[in-house]
């Protein structure tokens, strides 16, 4: 679901960059039937499944989850969430501050 070129950048973000959010949120997944979205900013290179993401407005906003689970998420109509092709990458820390209303 995520192009290999973007996966490579996400893997480079894993570790200290991701922990400090000093990297770019490369991908945004959206559910068109709700306001849910998920900005992915890191991918664990050792398992290629664990991602770090920001999901505004839904409980814990910065968290890790399974990429496979994300790709298998359905909306209320049974449609998959999908990658927002109009999203332009943004530095993860700036994105988080923007979501929090502090930017």
Image (cartoon, rainbow, N blue to C red):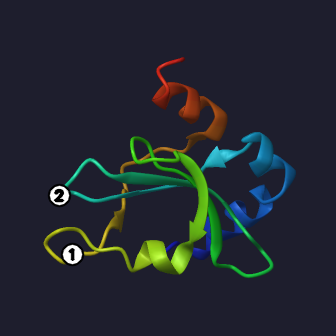
- Give the side of residue 42 with respect to residue 31, left or right: right
Q: Residue at x 74, y 82 (%)?
A: 47
What separation in Å lies between label 1 and label 2 (alpha carbons)?
9 Å
Q: Residue furthest right?
A: 16
Residue 18, x across and y down, in percent: 75, 50
Q: Residue at x 36, y 74 (%)?
A: 73
Q: Residue at x 63, y 40 (%)?
A: 92
Residue of label 2: 33
Q: Earlier in the sequence, mark 1 or mark 2?
A: 2
Question: Callout 2 environment at 10 Å: few (<14), some (14 to 19), or many (20+)?
Answer: few
Name the element at disc 2: loop
Q: Residue furthest top?
A: 102
Q: Nearer the viewer, residue 67 or 8?
A: 67
- Give the side of residue 15 with respect to residue 35, left or right: right
Mark carried by residue 79: 1
Compared with 14, 89 (above or below) is above
Residue 61, x across and y down, in percent: 52, 45
Q: Quick check: marks 1 and 2 in contact, CB under 8 Å? A: yes
Name the element at disc 1: loop
Q: Nearer the viewer, residue 67 or 85?
A: 67
Count of marks, rendered view: 2
- Give the side of residue 73 with respect to residue 17, left or right: left
Residue 94, x across and y down, in percent: 60, 29
Residue 70, x across and y down, in percent: 45, 71
Query: Where, by quadrant of the figure, is residue 96 drawn?
Result: top right
């Amino acid at each position: 679901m995520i192009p290999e070129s973007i996966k490579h950048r996400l893997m480079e973000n894993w570790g200290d960059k991701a922990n400090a959010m000093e990297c770019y949120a490369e991908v945004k997944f959206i559910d068109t039937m709700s306001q849910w979205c998920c900005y992915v900013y890191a991918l664990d290179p050792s398992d290629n499944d664990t991602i770090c993401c920001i999901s505004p407005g839904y409980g814990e906003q910065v968290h890790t989850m399974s990429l496979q689970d994300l790709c298998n998420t359905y909306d209320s109509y049974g449609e998959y969430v999908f990658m927002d092709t109009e999203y332009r990458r943004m530095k993860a820390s700036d994105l988080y501050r923007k979501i929090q209303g502090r930017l």
